[in-house]
Image (cartoon, rainbow, N blue to C red):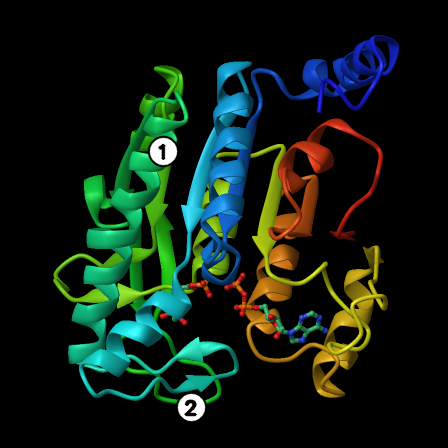
């Protein structure tokens, strides 16, 4: 890259990024990294570099990861079918064990390893650790989703402690039941990330996914909605413009905004260094929800 651009352009880019550095250093951002955006190893390495850069310059960075496709693959290996209702996985007891193994046992540790390799300081934990996430069985429109949880409490002290020491906390979204309930609950990673962003009073909540953002037509990548007004959301869900995994993604953005997070974005994790571009330029990639 340094060969392709002039010294002046190089310096200009850094100077233009300076106001953004000033805006975010010392502030907290929560990044949700979706399983679909994790599938390419080169892109994954670029995401790790971005996170390490943010953390190194003093932006308090929390990573919450998903892993839907990896869970699907493991279920398939064990002969189980994946079933989703409105973007949420039907989770029986056996599926819950597999969800915990894949998210907390495998992906969480893989990501921490990659962050360390990229020169960062990172610690992995699940929602169970230190009682970070407590949940109760979800009850939405009378549909039984098994061990899918609604987050009822977030105890972010462990995240604050790690952030104070310069670590990137890496969170997998398995939660413990409420007091007296030792069940584990499967939490949609977008939903958990938004709750964590609210609890940490984050300045920004960014979701990295495998589409350019919210699309007016899911089959047309050029139909990006750059700025989504929350008022339009219910009718977009009712008419099917927003469907499947995009439903919890958009709904949790609204929750985050209601909870006081000033900026929420959905961006394309397949674009190399999308996170840096979003954070430090005015190129306006992805969808901003207002
Ligand atoms: N209007 C829409 N715009 C973009 N994506 C949409 C839309 N409606 C549904 N989707 C689907 O939502 C998916 C993103 O959600 P999901 O698969 O849960 O991603 P992640 O793994 O990043 O959480 C897209 O791949 C797309 O198939
Ligand atoms: C309840 C529910 O649906 N949980 C999700 C948790 C992982 C996740 O959200 O992963 P992505 O971000 O890759 O979609 C699941 O079981 O797939």
Rendering coords of residue 229 (x, y %): 82, 60
Which residue occupies the foreground of this view, 171 or 78? Answer: 78
Assess disc 1: are there few (<14), some (14-19) or many (≥20) residues with their C-alpha within 10 Å of its C-alpha.
many
Rendering coords of residue 209 (x, y %): 58, 57
Q: Is residue 190 above or below residue 157?
A: below
Rendering coords of residue 59 (x, y %): 55, 21
Report the residue at 49% width, 16% height from top: 56
Report whether 252 appears left or right of 112: right
Q: Is residue 248 above or below residue 80?
A: above
Report the residue at 69% width, 76% height from top: 242
Q: Which residue is mark 2?
A: 142
Helix, strand or loop at mark 2: loop
Which residue occupies the foreground of this view, 27 or 218? Answer: 218
Rendering coords of residue 40 (x, y %): 49, 54
- Ligand 1 shows up in the quarter that is bottom right
Q: Is residue 195 above or below residue 115?
A: below
Q: CA distance from mark 2 to mark 1?
A: 35 Å
Where, by quadrant of the figure, is residue 115 drawn?
A: top left
Looking at the figure, which quarter contains the N terminus?
top right
Helix, strand or loop at mark 1: strand
Residue 169 circle label:
1
Residue extending furthest toward the front: 3
Report the residue at 69% width, 17% height from top: 21
């Amino acid at each position: 890259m340094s060969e392709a651009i002039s010294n002046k352009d190089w310096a200009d880019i850094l100077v233009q990024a300076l106001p953004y550095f000033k805006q975010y250093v010392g502030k907290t951002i929560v990044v949700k990294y979706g399983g679909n955006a994790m599938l390419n190893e080169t892109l994954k390495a670029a995401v790790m570099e971005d996170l390490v850069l943010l953390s190194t310059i003093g932006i308090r960075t929390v990573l919450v990861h998903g892993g839907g496709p990896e869970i699907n693959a493991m279920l398939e290996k064990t002969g189980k079918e994946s079933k989703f209702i409105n973007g949420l996985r039907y989770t029986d007891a056996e599926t819950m064990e597999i969800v915990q193994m894949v998210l907390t046992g495998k992906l969480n540790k893989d990501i921490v390893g990659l962050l360390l390799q990229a020169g960062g300081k990172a610690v992995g934990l699940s929602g169970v650790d230190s009682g970070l996430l407590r949940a109760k069985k979800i009850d939405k429109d009378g549909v039984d989703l098994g061990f899918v949880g609604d987050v009822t409490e977030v105890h972010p002290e462990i995240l604050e402690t790690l952030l104070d020491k310069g670590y990137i906390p890496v969170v997998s979204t398995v939660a413990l039941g409420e007091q007296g309930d030792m069940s584990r609950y499967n939490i949609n990673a977008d939903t958990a990330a938004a709750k964590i962003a609210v609890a940490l009073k984050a300045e920004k909540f960014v979701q990295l996914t495998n589409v350019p953002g919210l699309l007016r037509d899911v089959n047309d990548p050029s139909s990006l909605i750059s700025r989504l007004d929350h008022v339009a959301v219910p009718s977009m869900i009712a008419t099917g413009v927003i469907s499947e995994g995009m439903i919890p993604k958009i709904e949790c953005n609204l929750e985050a905004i209601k909870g006081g997070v000033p900026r929420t974005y959905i961006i394309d994790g397949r674009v190399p260094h999308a996170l840096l571009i979003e954070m430090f330029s005015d190129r306006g990639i992805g969808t901003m929800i207002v």
